[in-house]
């Protein structure tokens, strides 16, 4: 298995959470380091990349400060990936390693290589199309957004494209990763997912009280999304 550079995104104020993941990774053979994330709650001003008007059209509501900080934190991780010029495992600090973790890394780095980003975690079950199957795993393309960005593998070339296409931030980080039409990257998933979340309330998001979008507002949101995605057909999505 080739070397994998591992980054754990962690906020300065989440010391207890950081200690837990550091203890977990000490038992692995991974070359890892902590990347101090950008705490959206500490931002004095919205960053120039963030376009609130477009976000509100696309989602029906603006991003929370923590969601903006989350996106910027992952952007820092992509920059690190490029600087190291190495296959990189990006983890948020609420991950739990499952028994099939080592197998997933081995398969994705030595057997099935046709991907730009490999998702190792998802918050919801989604329909998918199988690309390769082993006796106890599947490599798939998700047909819907599984939500979350706690764990994924990324190649330096893909990190460069994500940087290029995130000059404007107008959707949550996990939606952006799955926005194939925008960045034209092949994102696959290893299932069963080898990483899950701890279930502890995350320090990266503060949208638990957000109400569902309904009625005319929901129809307008769907229209804006359709227009946004209409001009760049996804080259990777299975027909």
Image (cartoon, rainbow, N blue to C red):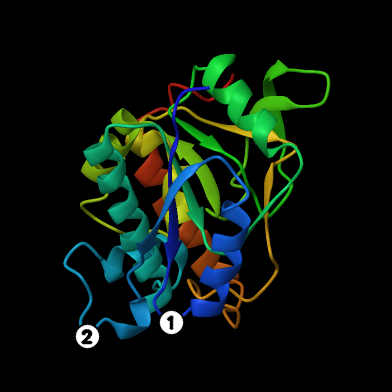
Q: Are marks 2 and 1 in contact (CB under 8 Å)?
A: no
User: Residue 117 or 30: which is nearer the viewer?
Assistant: 30
41 in relation to 234, above or below: below
Mark 2 vs mark 1, CA separation in Å: 17 Å
Q: Residue at x 73, y 25 (%)?
A: 138
Which of the two discs, 2 and 1, sits closer to the camera? 1
Q: Is residue 211 left or right of residue 82?
A: right
| Quadrant location, the C terminus | top right
Residue 155 in the image: state x and y as whole percent.
38, 31
Residue 154 in the image: state x and y as whole percent.
42, 36
6 in relation to 130, above or below: below
Q: Residue at x 61, y 72 (%)?
A: 212
Q: Which residue is mark 2?
A: 44
Image quadrant assignment for residue 17? bottom right
Image quadrant assignment for residue 199? bottom right
How many callouts does the rendering have? 2
Mark 2 Cα shell of 10 Å, populated few (<14), some (14-19), many (≥20): few
The answer to whether any part of residue 170 appears in the image is no
Residue 27 in the image: state x and y as whole percent.
63, 50
Q: Earlier in the sequence, mark 2 or mark 1?
A: 1
Label 2 sits on a secondary structure element that is loop
The residue furthest right is: 135
Q: Residue at x 39, y 77 (%)?
A: 12
The answer to whether any part of residue 63 appears in the image is yes
Residue 132 in the image: state x and y as whole percent.
68, 16
Instruction: Kindly identify which numbered label has been placed on residue 130.
Output: none
Q: Which residue is mark 1?
A: 13
User: Residue 121 or 126: which is nearer the viewer?
Assistant: 121
Label 1 sits on a secondary structure element that is loop
């Amino acid at each position: 298995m080739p070397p994998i550079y591992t980054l754990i995104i962690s906020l300065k104020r989440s010391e207890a959470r950081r200690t837990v993941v550091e203890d977990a990774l000490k038992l692995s053979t991974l070359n890892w380091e902590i990347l101090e994330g950008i705490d959206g709650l500490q931002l004095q001003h919205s960053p120039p990349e963030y376009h609130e008007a477009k976000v509100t059209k696309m989602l029906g509501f603006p991003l929370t400060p923590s969601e903006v900080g989350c996106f910027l934190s992952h952007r820092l991780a992509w920059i690190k990936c490029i600087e190291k010029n190495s296959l990189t495992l990006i983890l948020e600090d609420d991950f739990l390693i499952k028994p099939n973790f080592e197998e997933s890394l081995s398969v994705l780095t030595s057997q099935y290589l046709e991907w730009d980003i490999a998702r190792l975690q998802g918050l919801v079950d989604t329909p998918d199309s199988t690309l390769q199957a082993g006796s106890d795993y599947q490599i798939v393309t998700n047909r819907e957004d599984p939500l979350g960005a706690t764990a994924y593998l990324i190649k330096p070339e893909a990190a460069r494209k994500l940087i290029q296409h995130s000059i404007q931030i107008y959707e949550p980080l996990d939606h952006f990763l799955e926005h194939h039409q925008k960045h034209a990257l092949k994102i696959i998933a290893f299932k069963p997912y080898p990483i899950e979340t701890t279930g502890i309330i995350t320090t990266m998001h503060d949208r638990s009280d957000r109400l569902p979008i309904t009625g005319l507002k929901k129809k307008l949101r769907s229209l804006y999304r359709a227009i946004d995605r209409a001009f760049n057909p996804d080259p990777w999505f299975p027909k």
